[in-house]
Image (spheres, rainbow, N blue to C red):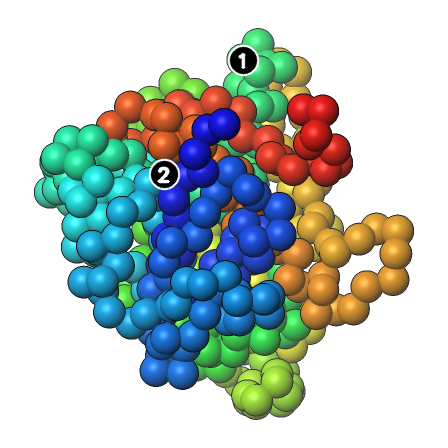
Amino acid sequence: MTEPLRIVAWGTGTVGSEMLTTIIDHRPDLEIVGARVYSGEKDGVDVGTLVGRDPIGVAATTDVDAIMGLDADCVLYTPRNTNLDEVCALLAGGKNVATTAFLFHPRRITPADRHRVLEACRAGDTTVHGSGLNPGNLSGALPLTLSGMCRTIDKITLQERADWSVYESTSITFDNMRFGQPVEEISPQASEFLAFNSGIFTEQVWFLADALNADIDEVTATVEAVPAREDHQIFDHVLRAGTTAGQRWKWSGRRHGEVLVEIETLWTVGGEYPEHWPKPQDGWTLTIEGDPSMRTHFFCLASFTRAASMEEHVRSASVATGMQVLNAVPAICAAPAGFATAATLPLIRSHVGFGNTAKA
């Protein structure tokens, strides 16, 4: 019998916890050997206990050196704020890295950073892969899969429409994404996080363009912020009238001025939707104009058949994000040293599936 792959969780937040519970409940081929946490309340707590399961005999730790010293095959890297030095140290130390946070298309990060990551991969004979939902599957794997039915492609557009009012992590909504701030303070460079977030979507446009021979010249990022018409109570925050309640982002890849690949996000808080914005369905709409043209709509829920709470429905997107990466771990560990992307890894599918693994 093959020994299970040894796994470290770097971050036990919303997405990290979903991956950990999946390993504990369903993945005997994976073994949790450590977890990096960020708070004193979690330090020393059994990983199973942290995610609402029975203890597994592995304590979480805030000690980065202790994590670096573990014998592990792969690190699930899911922090809110990324650190390239950490990732390079993990890779150079012989640990593959699977992340939902960044490095979706390393070919288009800055040359200096790309060189650092590649050198770390070569030193540790390791691989790094970034994916998730969007950026991730919906802006990477899915368009590439659909392109297999196209003779030629003229344009690819992905629209995401979502209201963040049901998302409980208000620190992300209000602190990182800056909803509730003056509309004139929302721009691709307004803060370190907005610049980072814009950068990973820019990478995804480059990814599709590079994978599908678009030969684009540039990717531009724009955002239109719109103010709230009235106050809204969003969990522990009040969104004040006149402050930012909507952000319409566009990342456009152009060749000779013509847009060939575009990702557009239509994000609101408070349920107010601007009349002049396009009105796709909630969720994600992927359109390929070409020969032939095609369109698919993606919407993620806890269930379409049973009654489920709003909390479960919101959590389903985190499950989808985590599973896209967790299900790729064996392929990442088997890949050649360096960068692995949706264009180079084999098809990633559910490991558990219907659960009848005894006959698999």
Residue 72: % across, % down: 31, 45
Residue neighbourhood size for the residue with mark 2, other residues' Cα within 10 Å, grouped as few (<14), some (14–19), many (≥20): many
| Residue under pointer 1 | 152
Residue denoted by label 2: 129
Residue 245 image position (x, y, % from top left): 56, 75
Q: Quadrant of residue 293?
A: top right
Looking at the rendered structure, the kind of residue marked 1 is: Thr
Please indicate, yes or no, whether residue 251 appears anywhere in the rendered image: no
Asked whether the beta carbons under mark 1 and mark 2 sit within 8 Å of each other, the answer is: no
Mark 2: amino acid: His
At x 38% / y 68%, what residue is drawn? Answer: 60
Residue 285 drawn at (x, y percent): 65, 42
Which is more toward the observer, 269 or 97? 97
Residue 41 in view in this figure: yes
The quarter of the picture where the C terminus appears is top right
Does residue 212 appear left or right of residue 133 in this picture? Answer: left
Give the residue drawn at x 52%, y 78%. Answer: 170
- Give the alpha-carbon distance from disc 1 to disc 2, as whole Å: 28 Å
The foreground one among 114 and 26 is 26
> Quick one: SS at disc 1?
strand
> Which mark lies nearer to you, 1 or 2?
2
Name the element at disc 2. strand
